[in-house]
Amino acid sequence: MNSFFVWLAMVIWSAAAVCIAAAARRNLLAGASEFFIGGRRLRGFVSGMTYAATTYSAFMLVGLVGLTYKTGMGALGFEMTYLIFTVLLLVTFGPRFWLAGNWYDHITPPELLANRYGSKWVGVAAAAISFFMLIPYASVQLMGMGFLVSGITGGQIPFMTGVLLMVALSGFTAFWAGMRSVAWTDAFQAVTMLVTSLAALGWTLYHFFGSPAGFAEAASKQIPELVTFTWEPAFFIGLTLPWAFFALTNPQVSQRMYVPDSAGSLRRMIIYFALFGFVYTIISTLFGLEAAMLIPGLDNPDKAMAHMLARVPTAMGLVIFVGIFAAATSTLGSIVLTLSSMFARDIAKQIRPGISESAERLLGQMSILVLLAACIVFAWLRPGLITVVSSMASGGLLVMAPAIVGVFFWKKATAEGALWSMVIGGLVTAVMYLAKIHPLGWWPSVWGGGLTVIVFICVSLLTTPPDNAGAFIDRVEEELDRHGFRLWLGRKKTRHPGKYRRV
Amino acid sequence: MKGSHFTILLIVITAVDVLVPYLWIGGIASLGASFLFWCALTLAVIVFAVAATRNWGRPV
């Protein structure tokens, strides 16, 4: 593809994103919570779209397409299982995070852990694990974009140019106005992702197969091995388990449970995200099946989408490219902003509890620059290890799941149980990933996750829970009723559709 | 959603999500099998979420 058109697409799209970020800054108020979580004032649509754009990275149109190309229907099952778990987790934990965040002015998920367990070290451990897992993951987003830009232009646009452009855009939106600009640009990016990929899928279905029905018929005949489900159980569970709890364990998404301005907005966030994820997953999977029929025999399945780009008209290729660029940029910006908030709130503020909110915010902004610099270095060096570390990100973050569940559902959960389960589980999972140890064929995430649950329960039963544990959980349960968060099950209908906004 | 409701629902849906493709339709070479099943199951969960949260934000 001609590099001029790629440059043109990136510049036009980036300019639009920058204008949106600048507009978002006009509504920015003072304070750390304003910068890091938009002052808890985001409406339902923007909340849902920033959740979607943060969750769905370039992995979808690159990695998931490749996974479908290579392994078929299991890829759809894996991704849909993730979505099912996420919807149910959001319905269950979303109101609890939102209520607790409002009461205690939580900005980060580790802050919730530290508060409930009465130990700053629990929060510090959760923050440290998040940094260790998410910086390589963010760097892979950069590397993916560098390879994509370089690949589709035949090297006319160098790898590092793509990396630096993405850093500039992500950094600008996060640094300029924090969550408010990230969320607004995320909404723009999410709409871009959905519209461009839908347009491209529709075009390819009709151009190459005549119609969606023609595609379905061709798939059954040409690639029967891919429209059947052939994944081994150990592979399916090993890959799906960490992602199933992604909504709780990945701070860049769990932090978004704090941002809606009302219970109604929280509901709309969940619904908009769920619908987005449903459609986007189907699109990505169908692209993978299309690629398998149109360009069979690729050595590297991750390049299936790049080869698809080469087979469509330039305008359509640019449309798909912009969608991937949007997905990667939005995920990077959200991760960097979340990590910066964790540095300011969960590390710096624990060392110097007396720092002001403005200093906290400034520290967060400075850490955005440092984090992006670290990501650039990772991407520039392109170490082989980074791929391993990034792939273990979701498995490593899974070790936080028992402690987070215990916050709201187990009064006997203790700080020691939470701390040691994360530390021991995290270390074991990391060592198993790095050493590529798969006992009995099961993935490190399965062993690490199981060990974490055992350590959490055993240590909690042997130690004393914090004094506030019972009161914390009881208050959450009472407030759920008071704010209408109960499900329709067993509830009386109301004739008063008024809306609560803040707690 | 209460923790007990959530746990039961999660176990049932996970069992359906995994067992149906592995034991029943996984080997059928058609988009009308596993593909349709996972799409329908996910859509059902989304519809459940929409219905189940309809009172959120309304005073009790």
Image: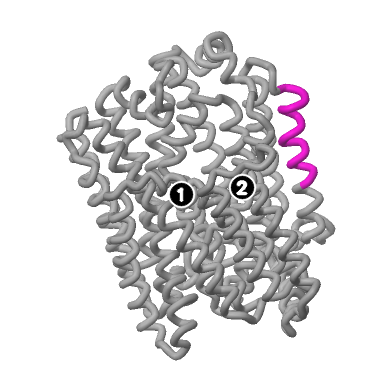
Of circles 1 and 2, which is in front? 2
Q: Amino acid at mark 2?
A: Pro
Looking at the image, residue A294 lies above or below residue A307: above
Quadrant for residue B36, please give it. Answer: top right
- Within 10 Å of disc 1 (Cα), the crowding (few <14, some 14-19, many 20+) is many
Quadrant of the image containing the N terminus of chain A: top left
Given residues A196 and A127, the one toward you in this image is: A127
Q: What span is in magenta?
A: B11-25
Residue B36 relative to residue A490: left or right: left
Question: Which chain is indicated by disc 2?
Answer: A
Query: Visible in this render: residue A183?
Result: no
Q: Name the foreground residue: A423 vs B35.
A: A423
What residue is shown with label 1?
A390
A356 in relation to A203, above or below: below
Determine the main secondary structure of the stretch shown in magenta. Answer: helix
Determine the residue located farthest toward the bottom in the rendered image.
Answer: A354
Q: Is residue A490 magenta?
A: no
Circle 2 is placed at which residue position? A444
Q: Earlier in the sequence, mark 1 or mark 2?
A: 1
Residue B5 left/right relative to A264: right
Instruction: Look at 48% across and 15% down and name the residue there.
Output: A211
Callout 2: SS: helix
Closer to us: A347 or A280: A347
Horizontal side of A42 relative to A317 (left or right) equals: right
Q: Secondary structure at mark 1?
A: helix
The quadrant where residue B19 appears? top right
Q: Chain of mark 1?
A: A
Query: Marks 2 and 1: in contact by CB < 8 Å?
Result: no
Is B18 within the magenta? Answer: yes
Query: In the rendering, at what x and y percent does residue A324 appear?
Result: 36, 40
Residue drawn at x 46%, y 70% as measured from the top left: A342
Pick the quarter of the image with the C terminus of chain A: bottom right
